Image (tube, grey):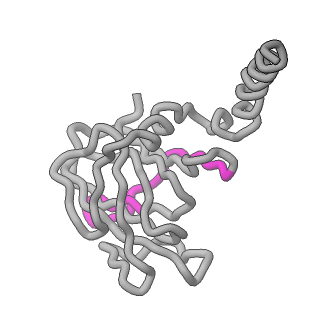
């Protein structure tokens, strides 16, 4: 009995990493291990769509979104959602500490718009996978040191977790 239990534990130990390797979490264009940890952490900062943050959160930020009919945006989303039933909204972020390339990572499938100085910021890179539990997309943008409006649309659930920070 003990021997079969040890065999089962050994098999589970061997299969665990193989299953993890089969998901797409290691196949993004850049590493997102830190974002995965931030999304899984407890005690994340939570904000309702339409509100403003006084500082960028150190970890993940959870945004409580509005149904499509009530969602408000600084500027219209650049892309129409793929479905009729979706959630979205915007949050205002403070002026960034310094200009540079920033990375925004999303936990759910969504369209993201970043607005700075009344214009859509342009992506300098993106990576996305549908086979990584808890992480869907990561976008890099060249931003200046001014305030940011972060908009998300086309989100199926009514919350989304995001991380934002300078690319190291």
x then y, percent, for residue 36? 50, 38
x then y, percent, for residue 122? 44, 55
- Between residue 130 and residue 79, name the one nearer to us: 130
Residue 134 vertical placement versus 21 (above, below): below
The number of numbered badges drawn on the structure is: 0
- Between residue 126 and residue 122, name the one nearer to us: 126
x then y, percent, for residue 43? 31, 44
- Side (left or right) of 1 relative to 124: right
Residue 133 vertical placement versus 11 (above, below): below
* Location of the N terminus (image quadrant): top right
x then y, percent, for residue 76? 40, 77
Name which residue lies at 27% across and 43% down: 57
Name which residue lies at 21% across and 39% down: 97
In magenta stretch: residue 118: yes
In magenta stretch: residue 10: no
Task: State the residue lying farthest toward the front.
Answer: 1
Q: Which residues are magenta?
A: 113-130
- Side (left or right) of 6 relative to 48: right
Residue 60 vertical placement versus 5 (above, below): below
Name which residue lies at 78% across and 20% down: 5
Q: Main secondary structure of the magenta part?
A: strand
- Side (left or right) of 110 relative to 60: right
Task: State the residue lying farthest toward the top.
Answer: 3
Name which residue lies at 71% across and 26% down: 17
């Amino acid at each position: 009995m003990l021997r079969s239990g040890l065999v089962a534990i050994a098999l589970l130990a061997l299969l665990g990493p193989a299953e993890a390797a089969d998901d797409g979490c290691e196949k993004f264009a850049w590493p997102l291990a830190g974002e995965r940890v931030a999304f899984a952490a407890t005690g994340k900062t939570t904000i309702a769509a339409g509100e403003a943050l006084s500082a960028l959160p150190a970890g993940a930020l959870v945004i409580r979104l509005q149904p499509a009919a009530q969602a408000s945006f600084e500027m219209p989303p650049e892309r129409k959602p793929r479905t009729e039933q979706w959630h979205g909204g915007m949050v205002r972020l403070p002026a960034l500490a310094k200009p540079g390339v920033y990375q925004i990572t999303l936990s759910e499938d969504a369209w993201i718009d970043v607005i700075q100085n009344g214009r859509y910021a342009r992506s300098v890179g993106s990576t996305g996978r549908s086979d990584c539990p808890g992480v869907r997309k990561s976008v890099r943008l060249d931003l200046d040191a001014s305030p940011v409006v972060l908009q998300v649309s086309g989100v199926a659930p009514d919350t989304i977790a995001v991380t934002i920070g300078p690319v190291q």
